[in-house]
Amino acid sequence: MKKPTAILLAAVMTFVVTACGIEPTLATSRTKAFYESVDFTNFALVTEEIVAKEKMTLYVKGDSAYMKIEGSGSINDVAMLTVGKVTYLIDDKNKIYAFKDSDDELSGIIAGVKIDFNNAVLCGYGNSDFMGETRYYEEIMTIHGEIIRHYFDTDSDTVIGQAMNGLVFSWDLSSDIPKEAFEVPSGYIKVEIGEDFDY
């Protein structure tokens, strides 16, 4: 007799395959190979939404992470820096910083970039326009039903773009991390969240 969790997983995967219209073939997908090649303990990722021009800069090295989103309203110009179990919020515009209560920001940041291929299927692939050029793409449907499209560089298996939830992003992934990325800038003043720091 199958366990309830196994039955539920089988039902969900059946729905996913039916919705996508093709059999899952993740084993040979460029998307899976690309993610498996990335060292998620040491990387730099810069993405930019091509319409709204919202830009995210992310650096990860060991137990440290730096993330800044520009062009997104209330958190514009505010960076989050995690070093070990200590997290700072940094306002470069006003040259101030504050401590932020958190348990494990780093795991959440990395989980937001990676894909769980154990519970996903390849549901589409082909060629399409990306920033004025025809690029090969693959679409992955996650266990939650979210479809994520990845665009690839013509001459390699490097992801150069991503599309999901109606938004399209350029991708620039490397290991080029600035030396000062995981330090609070010199001369910034420490303040308290909710008083002098509007986050």
Image: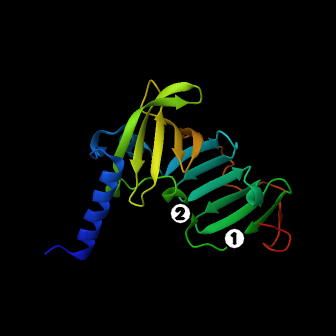
Horizontal arrangement in the rendering, residue 120 relative to residue 74 (left or right):
left
Can you give x and y, in whole percent of width and height, for residue 17 in the image? 30, 52
Within 10 Å of disc 2 (Cα), the crowding (few <14, some 14-19, many 20+) is: few
Separation of residues labelled 2 and 1 (CA atoms): 15 Å
Q: Where's the C terminus, which quadrant?
A: bottom right
Amino acid marked by disc 1? Lys
The quarter holding residue 86 reads: bottom right
Q: Secondary structure beneath disc 2?
A: helix
Per the image, the residue denoted by label 2 is 108
Viewer-proximal residue among 45 and 85 = 45
Q: Give the residue number, with chain letter if any, for mark 1.
A: 100
Instruction: Name the amino acid, label 2.
Output: Gly
The N terminus is located in which quarter? bottom left
Q: Position of residue 82 (x, y in %)?
A: 62, 62
Q: Earlier in the sequence, mark 2 or mark 1?
A: 1
Checking the image for residue 49, the label placed there is none
Above or below, comparing residue 159 to residue 73 in the picture: above
Of the two numbered discs 2 and 1 in the rendering, the one whose residue sits closer to the viewer: 2
Name which residue lies at 84% across and 57% down: 95
Residue 124 located left or right of residue 128: left
The answer to whether residue 44 is visible is yes
Is residue 174 left or right of 18 when viewed as pictured?
Answer: right
* Picture coordinates of residue 157, whole percent (x, y): 42, 32
Residue at 86% x, 70% y: name it. 196
Q: Is residue 184 visible?
A: no
Q: Nearer the viewer, residue 146 or 79?
A: 146
- Residues 74 and 168: in front is 168
Q: In the picture shown, does residue 32 fall above or below 185?
A: above
